[in-house]
Image: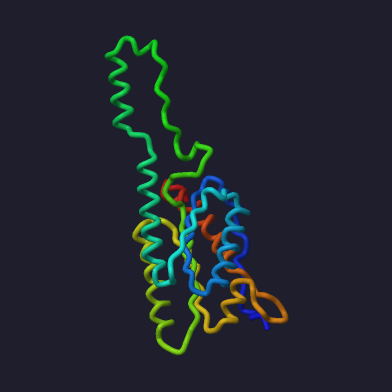
Amino acid sequence: MSDPTIKGLPPPPVKYDGSNFRIAIVHARWNDAIIKALLDGTINKLKEQGVKEENIVVKSVPGSYELPFATKQLIEAGKVQSANAAPSMIASSTTNLLSLIDNTSSTQPAEPQPKSSAGSSGPLTTPFDAVISIGCLIKGSTMHFEYICDAVTHGLMRIQLDTGTPVVFGVLTALNDDQALERAGIGRGEKGKGHNHGEDWGLAAVELAAQNKDWTKGVL
């Protein structure tokens, strides 16, 4: 029987455009069938909101315990990649000064300037606007479940507070297999397959990315 407590996230009060967002997804590989369903649901919902496929970066780690480390490193890697892709301000200033000295520069074609990452037709190289961390923990007969749940939850929360990048908590913490399957939308009950929470995480990522951009500019 499908669990009646499973609910999906209602649409946000404002429709957000994700076409200029760069979203990272990092997922565990434990409980692979459930993870795959959650990942598909997340990506489909991101695309529905306009996020381009080339701007969705997907990485995997062995298990949920590794998610906080991988999430933090992805955020930092996105910032490094953005800095490396940005045109050098020093080089640009030097070129402008030399052109004032060289009176022949007016007859030479201008040096092409690198396109901004946001204006290029290829994948964005800007820092990630949000990260979705996906895992699935199912309670067994030892305390392992409780320890991992607690560590991962606090770790992911700390990362978003420390980095200022929204991190969506996409970790199922189920008491049995059926609870996890239903929350991935692939339940085996006769009255329904449940709800894929990956869709909710995709919605949340775009909403948080959009709001965070406004908040960092002082727009309320």
Against 146, is 103 above or below? above
The part of the image, by quadrant, that contains residue 116 is top left
Against 104, is 193 above or below? below
- Percent x, y of residue 201: 54, 63
Q: Relative to 86, is 130 on the left or the right?
A: right
- Of residue 14 and residue 76, the one placed in the foreground of this image is 76
Q: Is residue 203 visible?
A: no
Q: Relative to 26, is 42 on the left or the right?
A: right
- Which scheme is used to colour this image of the protein? rainbow
Q: Residue furthest bottom?
A: 141
- Percent x, y of residue 185: 63, 71
Q: Is residue 143 visible?
A: yes
The part of the image, by quadrant, that contains residue 75 is bottom left
- Percent x, y of residue 129: 46, 52
The part of the image, by quadrant, that contains residue 126 is top left
Count of number-bearing discs: 0
Q: Residue furthest right?
A: 191
- Of residue 210 and residue 114, the one placed in the foreground of this image is 114
Quarter of the picture containing the N terminus is bottom right
- Percent x, y of residue 148: 40, 77
Residue drawn 57% across the image and 61% down it: 42
Q: Relative to 59, is 162 on the left or the right?
A: left
Residue drawn 64% across the image and 73% down it: 186
